[in-house]
Image (cartoon, rainbow, N blue to C red):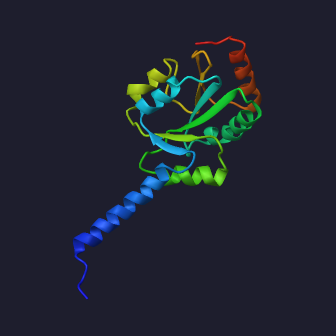
Amino acid sequence: MKPIPKISVFAFILFAAWISTASVWKADGFKVIDFDEFESITKTPSEKIRMFNFWATWCAPCVKEMPDFEKVNAQDPEVELMFISLDDGNKTQRVQEFIQKRGIKAPVFLLDDVDYNKWIDKVSSNWSGAIPATLFISADGTRFFHEGELNEKQLKYLIKKIKQGHNEK
């Protein structure tokens, strides 16, 4: 029997690593994106109020508010929730495991664009960069931004204001 060349073994290992990474990126409800992709998602027309909640696995207030966001999203058919993770783009497995462990139902996008100073003001000129933070976009495209933790009652109040057209910039 002829031995397998070392280069073939190395190529196989690289291919296997690529496949395992690709499956994390394409897992149901989870995708790694850059800021241009995020911007494209925000510009996609929708009849719903879209909530883009910026968070990270290491942010305690972010993790604390996630169940309230999921609850409001499940109760109100006029809203659509997307979680935008600001975790390290090289640690997709950590985010994927967090999603599975916590039973997160809403889509999760890992925003892998570390040049925050380039895009934070594009999300909102009012954003200091602190998380949690949430960008709301109404059906007519009007944007409202909130920096800081929200509980269920506060979130419902903000959504009610947005539905009534009382948007604050």
Give how far across and how far down residue 18 sits, in percent.
38, 57
The residue sitting at the front extreme is: 1
Quarter residue 4 falls in = bottom left
Between 71 and 3, which is closer to the camera in this rendering? Answer: 3
Seen at 32% across and 62% down, the residue is: 14
Quadrant of the frame with the N terminus: bottom left
Residue at point 53%, 30% (across, down): 130
Residue 59, given in percent of the width and then of the height, sits at 57, 41
Residue 116 relative to residue 42: left or right = left
Quarter assignment of residue 159: top right
Quadrant of the image containing the C terminus: top right
Q: Is residue 87 above or below residue 94?
A: above
**Count of marks, rendered view:** 0
Q: Position of residue 61 (x, y in %)?
A: 63, 38
Left or right: where 165 falls relative to 125: right
Q: Please tell me whether residue 36 is drawn above or below residue 22 in the rendered image.
A: above
Q: Residue at x 68, y 11 (%)?
A: 165
Q: Which residue is nearer to you in this view: 2 or 83?
A: 2
In the image, 49 versus 47, the foreground residue is 47
Kindly give the residue lying farthest to the bottom in the view shown.
1
Compared with 77, 14 (above or below) is below
| Residue 45 falls left or right of residue 3 | right
